Amino acid sequence: MELFTYYRSTSSYRVRIALALKGLGYQALPVNLLKGEQRGAQYLALNPQGRVPALRTDDGELLVQSPAIIEYLEEQYPQPALLPASAEARAKVRGVAAIIGCDIHPLHNVSVLNQLRQLGHDEGQVNQWIAHWIGQGLAAVEQLIGEDGFCFGTAPGLADVYLIPQLYAAERFNTDLSGYPRIRRVAALAAEHPAFAKAHPANQPDTPAQ
Amino acid sequence: MELFTYYRSTSSYRVRIALALKGLGYQALPVNLLKGEQRGAQYLALNPQGRVPALRTDDGELLVQSPAIIEYLEEQYPQPALLPASAEARAKVRGVAAIIGCDIHPLHNVSVLNQLRQLGHDEGQVNQWIAHWIGQGLAAVEQLIGEDGFCFGTAPGLADVYLIPQLYAAERFNTDLSGYPRIRRVAALAAEHPAFAKAHPANQPDTPAQ
């Protein structure tokens, strides 16, 4: 498999965690978002939306959008499972993933922040905007995840795949996590886990030397 | 099953289409977003995020977030299927759903538009914001869906479940769809389909008399 990725992209980071948790090897094909490579003709011909991540499967098919790619990995490489067995338990895990994937991250995606800047907002207002959406979303996540272990149980799963990259973004934006002890517990567990380390933005082939 | 719903909510509308396509009966429990019922203590005790939709299953479990609820319905009530059989084909369908669910709709959710108004933007600027995100997202969808039938094939599926409510929103916001012939073809097919009619905002128990 080949993954079109950018080291600091939240949604690329999700897919990298899922690949690492399943022990799957892949070729990283970095797309430099700062240089605008995602809008180059070559990349747009592959992925008309011009976003990362995208996964080229072993059959040569190009898959886009991290939620779709992660569900594909779960179906194609079911072990270790990122989702529990029962349909209701799966829905609860996917619900937390969707709060992060639909109600938090899209609001502070770099394209949205640039749009706010174009509307004349200064960095103080942009940061307030970010803090509003991250705070509101994480407050809900805190109430929906379990009281020990990872988000749901002793092994990392789909909700953790979404939460940890969101916390990386929250840290970059200086979000106060003191009110979320469950989330901080999950973060501490992930920090000790080799798959999360492997997928971390600090450890990618396109991570700047400093 | 019981569905906490609001007639004009895009994500409630998605779940209603999925239920109708599968021929599943349910009790609609309207939550009036204009009156702020989603932030009332009673509803927040059920759903700490204070959003619709939420589905109470026959086992009494409350499921939140439309992507999670729809995947639950697909797993629990597999026929008729909203997703194709092969993992790669499923990922392509889910990719289009995710473009709409993560990159279009979250940017024009009523809470986001209210936030823009609080930042001092007038309705002209709010409408430009909406048009930007809907236009960018639908342009990608147009390139990814099939050349005839519904989004992917002759029967409606998950991508259509997301697309049709998005088009309802696009119409409210006066989006120009003339550049998207495939999307307009899908809209015309859905307009003739009884499940989409049943789920339409015009036909709900909480639809205002006028």
Image (tube, coloured by chain):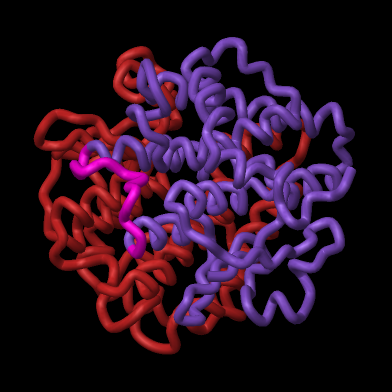
Chain colours: A purple, B red
Residues rendered magenta in the picture: A76-88
Instruction: Tell me the quarter of the picture where residue B115 sits.
Output: top right
Q: Nearer the viewer, residue A96 or A86?
A: A86
| Prevailing SS of the magenta stretch | loop
Q: Nearer the viewer, residue A92 or A201?
A: A201
Image coordinates for residue A144, horizontal then vertical, percent: 38, 24
Instruction: State how many labels appear.
Output: 0
Work out whether residue B12 can be spotted: no
Residue at (65% x, 61% y) in the render: A52
Q: Nearer the viewer, residue A127 or B4?
A: A127
Q: Is residue A173 left or right of residue B196?
A: right
Residue at (66% x, 60% y) in the render: A5
Image coordinates for residue B137, horizontal then vertical, percent: 60, 64
Work out whether residue A111 can be spotted: yes
Image coordinates for residue B200, horizontal then vertical, percent: 31, 57
Membership of A77 in magenta stretch: yes
* Position of B4 relative to B67 (above/below): above
* Position of A103 relative to A206 (above/below): above
Instruction: Tell me the quarter of the picture where residue A27 sits.
Output: bottom right
Outermost residue, bottom side: B147
Instruction: Tell me the quarter of the picture where residue B173 sits.
Output: bottom right
> Which quadrant holds the C terminus of chain A?
top right
Q: Is residue A123 left or right of residue B86?
A: right
Residue at (45% x, 31% y) in the render: B34
Residue at (40% x, 69% y) in the render: B93
Membership of A150 in magenta stretch: no
Image coordinates for residue B112, horizontal then vertical, percent: 61, 38
